[in-house]
Structure formats: C-alpha cells, structure tokens
Image (tube, rainbow, N blue to C red):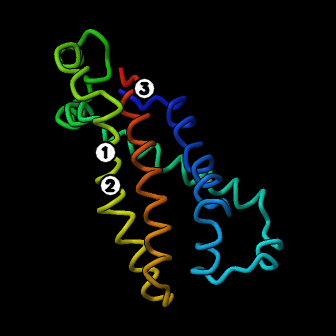
C-alpha cells in the first residue's frame, strides 16, 4: 500500500486557495493584519514566491499525513507491517491484506468522513499549536481565532479530499 501522491499534491493546493480567500481584505485580511501587527507597507516587502512555495511544500506534508488520519485502512497495513511478504504479490500475507481490503477497503471513504477527521485534527492539533505560539507572541484572541479557523477549515477540506479521492491499493 502507498499513498496516492496525485491526490496529496492536489489537496496541498487547498491551503493556498483558501488562504487567498480567507486572508483577503474583504474577508479576514484586514482583521488579521491588525491582530498580527502587519502593515500594508511591511507586507509589500515579503518574498511571495518563497512564501507561497514553502506554503505549498509544507501543505504537501499535511496532505500526506491526512492519509493516515482519515483513511482507516492504513491500520490494516500496520497490523501486517512486520511481515516482509506483505508487499510480495501472491504470498499469504499479501493475499490476506488484499482480502481484507476487498472486504473493507471502501468503508468510511467519503468526503464527509475525511472532513470530520480533518476537523478533529484541526481542533486538537492546529488550534493548540497556534494558541501556544500566540500566547508567547502576546497575540490576542482574534489572531488565534482567524489563524486557527483557517487551519481547521483547511484541514477539513484536505481531509475530505484525501479520504474520498485517494486510491491506496
């Protein structure tokens, strides 16, 4: 079994597209700039190609991880991971895994299921990390809410796309 890298690369575009909408001045952009202490003048000096490139790279990491967060069938692989024959077609271990995936490979493989797990990940991982950083940076509730809200929605969408559209076998 291996992740569907095409879907990983597609899902990694979600934070870029969502960020364009979320941090737009017509949505949360002005409020975020004020809460973050960013001015229009200081924003103009940003190296946008580098920022967007690194955002995409790290979003690939997140989308890749969403495979293991949203697709329960990866647990089947972990049960057989210590068997070297599991990856050799025709062996008992490979046939056992194939049989299990034939029976259960489509269970819980919906956008909604992935979105649920993506949301849980956003709330229980992204929110605490953003909040801890914001506390030490002396940022307020609005800063936390805007940034955490963005990542919760991004992970919701990424989880949904990865869970629904990935082919893991």
Looking at the image, which is closer to me, 122 or 84? Answer: 122
Q: Using the image, determine if residue 28 lies above or below residue 57.
A: below
Where is residue 42 shown, x and y percent of the image? Answer: 78, 79
Res 169 label: none
Mark 1 crowd level (few <14, some 14–19, many ≥20, 10 Å Cα): some
In this picture, residue 168 sits left or right of residue 147: left
In this picture, residue 57 sits left or right of residue 97: right
Spatial CA distance of label 2 from label 1 is 8 Å
| First reached walking from the N terminus: tag 3 or tag 2 | 2
The residue to which callout 2 is attached is: 121
Mark 3 crowd level (few <14, some 14–19, many ≥20, 10 Å Cα): some
Where is residue 84 shown, x and y percent of the image? Answer: 26, 29
Where is residue 51 shown, x and y percent of the image? Answer: 70, 61
Q: Quadrant of the C terminus?
A: top left
Q: Using the image, determine if residue 131 lies above or below residue 52.
A: below
Mark 2 crowd level (few <14, some 14–19, many ≥20, 10 Å Cα): many
| First reached walking from the N terminus: tag 1 or tag 3 | 1
Q: Residue 36 occupies which quadrant of the picture?
A: bottom right
Identify the residue at horizontal 39%, vertical 46% (top origin): 156
The residue to which callout 1 is attached is: 69
Identify the residue at horizontal 45%, vertical 89% (top origin): 136
Q: Using the image, determine if residue 76 lies above or below residue 57.
A: above
In this view, the mark in front (2 or 1): 2
Q: Residue 12 occupies which quadrant of the picture?
A: top right
Looking at the image, which is closer to me, 129 or 89? Answer: 129
In this view, the mark in front (1 or 3): 3
């Amino acid at each position: 079994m291996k992740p569907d890298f095409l879907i990983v690369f597609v899902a990694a575009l979600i934070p870029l597209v969502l960020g364009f909408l979320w941090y737009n001045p017509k949505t949360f952009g002005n409020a975020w700039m004020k809460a973050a202490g960013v001015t229009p003048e200081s924003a103009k000096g940003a190296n946008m190609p580098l920022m967007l490139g690194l955002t995409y790279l790290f979003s690939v990491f997140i989308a890749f991880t969403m495979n293991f967060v949203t697709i329960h069938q990866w647990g089947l692989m972990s049960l057989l991971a210590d068997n070297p024959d599991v990856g050799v077609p025709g062996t008992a271990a490979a046939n056992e895994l194939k049989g299990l995936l034939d029976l259960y490979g489509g269970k819980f493989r919906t956008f909604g299921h992935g979105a649920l797990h993506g949301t849980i990940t956003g709330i229980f991982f992204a929110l605490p990390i953003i909040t801890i950083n914001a506390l030490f940076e002396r940022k307020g509730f609005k800063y936390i809410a805007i940034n955490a809200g963005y990542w919760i929605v991004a992970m919701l969408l990424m989880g949904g796309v990865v869970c629904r559209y990935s082919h893991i076998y």
